[in-house]
Image (tube, rainbow, N blue to C red):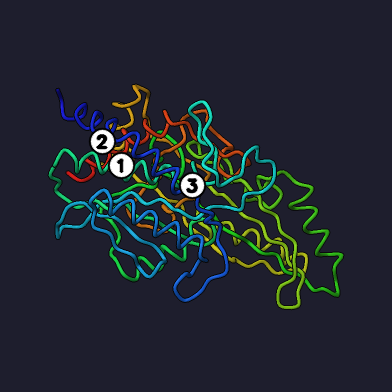
Amino acid sequence: MGLDQRIIEAVDSLKDEMIDSILELVRIDSVEGAGSEDAPFGPGVKQALLSALDISGRLGFDTVNLDNYIGYAQYGRGEDGYVCAIGHVDVVPVGEGWKQPPFSGYMENGVIYSRGVLDNKGPVLACLYGLAALKKLGLGLRRPVRIIFGCDEETGFEDLNYYLTKENPPVYGFTPDCKYPVVYSERGRAVVRILGDKEKLEPFFEFVNQYFIGARNTGDRLGIDFFHEEYGTMEMRGYKLGCVDGMVSFDVTLSYPGGFSIQQIMDKVQGKALESGLRAELVMNYDPVIFEKDSPMVKALQESYEIVTGQDGTPVTTTGGTYAKGMPGIVPFGPSFPGQKGIGHNPNEWMTVDDLMTNARIYALALYRLGQL
């Protein structure tokens, strides 16, 4: 029996334990709450982090809790850097329309319904149990492997920023918080704010209506409808009207393709705003994440996906945003398979047991391969 098959069988032997652990974790309400000194993202998120670390400890991993901002389990030792999978235990608010309580861990016909089962508690524990399979087989790795449990992915990456003040970034890694096949590049993401005088609202609303509300979401009227054949066209969304520092404001989130800079975008937006007597400023920006499709890391992840699924694993791009925006050296990888969209932030968020197991098999092979690079 080949090593890949041995690893897959070791994952399968942990199925019941993994599903029990996922149910344990998704039953914790970990929507961000009021922070405190020992629970920076609220008591529910802290409880979820402690539960994930407890599960890791029960599997025999060394664990580290970085002041309840973020934590990790580790397998192996070494001074030549580490590899990782980084997911998160915080979740978005539940919303309305659930057929069962959103933190019940309800299972029906092989499907688990709970807030966070897909985004991202199930997948990060699939990574953990994939690593547990390597540990069970006693496989040696060139580099130590960490499974990192973030706590602020949904609301600001403060957890990741804190982590990087305490720890070095990984040599290689992935975040199981997007889609398959391996995502070699993420679009850039920015928030741009238009500001106007509250005493002169007419030019402000004319500008907003002309260039945003009444326009296509590509930014074509602003001249920022940039297109790249591998990413597609600029997308504008997340419109928000408000007041900032005594001025009326309009925020827009931009998802822009690789190959273009935020300065190119801002030059055009600021020019148009200035013509109308308004001001445009950059509130936030994450540059595009770009890796070579034939890099050793991307090839290792592609190979792992193809071995388990038998499907074409040609690397792809995404319009989404993940921890890859803030953690050097990582790419998005799973957990959603082609055709699975619009699940994570909606009512009745779900993931099948079969998909969770397929993810764990893929992640086990991927972590083994990355650990040998």
- Alpha carbon distance from label 1 to label 2: 12 Å
Res. 234 image quadrant: top right
x, y percent for residue 328: 35, 57
Task: Single out the mark in the foreground, 1 or 2.
Answer: 1
Identity, as a three-letter code, of the amino acid under mark 1 = Tyr
x, y percent for residue 358: 37, 30
Identity, as a three-letter code, of the amino acid under mark 2 = Leu
Residue 44 shown left or right of residue 191 in the figure: left
Residue 148 shown left or right of residue 277 in the figure: left
Mark 3 element type: helix
Task: Single out the mark in the foreground, 3 or 1.
Answer: 3
Task: Single out the mark in the foreground, 2 or 3.
Answer: 3
Residue named by callout 2? 365
Mark 2 element type: helix
- Alpha carbon distance from label 3 to label 1: 16 Å
Q: Is residue 78 above or below residue 232?
A: below
Q: Nearer the viewer, residue 11 or 292?
A: 11
Question: Would you say residue 317 is visible in this rendering?
Answer: yes
Residue named by callout 1? 129
Residue 282 shown left or right of residue 184 in the figure: right
x, y percent for residue 216: 72, 43
Number of the label disc, if any, that sits on residue 156: none
Residue 196 shown left or right of residue 108 in the figure: right
Pointer 2 or 3: first along the chain:
3
Number of the label disc, if any, that sits on residue 26: 3
